Image (cartoon, grey):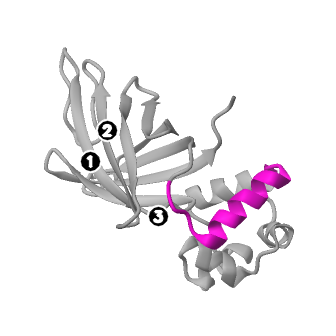
């Protein structure tokens, strides 16, 4: 991201408005502009995406930020996950496509994520039910090895209304994992 102040001007946003839309303290946005600190990677990725997007995409994204998302858009997402209890703060990420209630993704080690999601308007949450297939002899950030036959992890979680980054804490095999789902862009045609 080359110049956040210029980008905000181009988007027609004030610092305080961006802070409200992202759900952060206005001082955070000020710190990002004055380079006292960098925005979190998912926010920086989203801002870089806006910086390079076509005007109609910018209009749509800023409109969604202003009004609040109702449900996850179909698109390409980065799902990052971290074991907060791990000695090194082990983390990884995968790319996933969300389309019409289905989710499919993979990580760089051959793990495959598939499942469904649905928006519950009364609760203003999106419920995800997915399976993560770990390849044979694959190792998870939970610290176990899948063995010769691989392994299957079942994951159910809920995300509140989507923002550029949506987060959840989920229990897998008795351990807590931080999940962050970041919208990267529309599904290519």
Mark 3 highlights which residue? 161
Residue 74 position by quadrant: top right
- Going 57% across and 69% down the picture, which residue do you hit? 68
Label 1, label 3: how far apart the Cα atoms are: 16 Å
Q: Earlier in the sequence, mark 2 or mark 1?
A: 2
Q: Nearer the viewer, residue 117 or 50?
A: 117
Q: Nearer the viewer, residue 62 or 49?
A: 62
Q: Position of residue 101 (x, y in %)?
A: 44, 41
Which SS class for mark 3?
loop
Q: Position of residue 98 (x, y in %)?
A: 50, 40
- 156 lies above or below 100: below
Q: Is residue 91 visible?
A: yes
Q: Nearer the viewer, residue 89 or 4?
A: 4
What main secondary structure does the magenta stretch of the protein show? helix
Queried whether the magenta region covers residue 61, the answer comes back as yes
- 33 lies above or below 107: below
Q: Tag 3: Cα neighbours inside 10 Å, few (<14), some, or many (≥20)?
A: some
- Going 74% across and 56% down the picture, which residue do you hit? 50
**What is the quadrant of the C terminus in the image?**
top right
Q: Is residue 149 left or right of residue 179?
A: left
Q: Which residues are magenta?
A: 52-71
Disc 2 to disc 1: CB gap under 8 Å: yes
Q: Position of residue 23 (x, y in %)?
A: 53, 75
Disc 1 to disc 3: CB gap under 8 Å: no
Which SS class for mark 2?
strand
- Going 29% across and 27% down the picture, which residue do you hit? 133
Label of residue 130 in the image: 2
- 60 lies above or below 81: below
Label 3, label 2: how far apart the Cα atoms are: 19 Å
Label of residue 156 in the image: 1
């Amino acid at each position: 991201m080359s110049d956040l102040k210029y980008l905000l001007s181009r988007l027609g946003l004030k610092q305080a408005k961006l802070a409200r839309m992202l759900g952060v303290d206005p001082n955070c946005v000020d710190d990002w502009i004055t380079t006292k600190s960098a925005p979190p990677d998912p926010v920086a990725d989203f801002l870089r995406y806006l910086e390079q997007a076509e005007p109609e995409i910018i209009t749509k994204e800023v409109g969604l930020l202003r009004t609040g998302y109702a449900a996850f858009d179909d698109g390409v997402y980065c799902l990052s996950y971290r074991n907060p209890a791990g000695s090194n703060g082990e983390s990884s990420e995968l790319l996933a496509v969300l389309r019409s209630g289905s989710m499919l993704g993979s990580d760089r080690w051959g793990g495959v994520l598939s499942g469904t999601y649905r928006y519950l308007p009364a609760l203003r949450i999106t419920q995800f039910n997915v399976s993560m297939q770990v390849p044979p002899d694959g190792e998870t950030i939970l610290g176990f090895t899948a063995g010769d036959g691989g392994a299957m992890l079942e994951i159910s979680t809920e995300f509140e209304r989507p923002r550029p980054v949506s987060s959840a804490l989920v229990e897998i095999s008795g351990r807590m994992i931080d999940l962050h789902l970041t919208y990267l862009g529309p599904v290519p045609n």
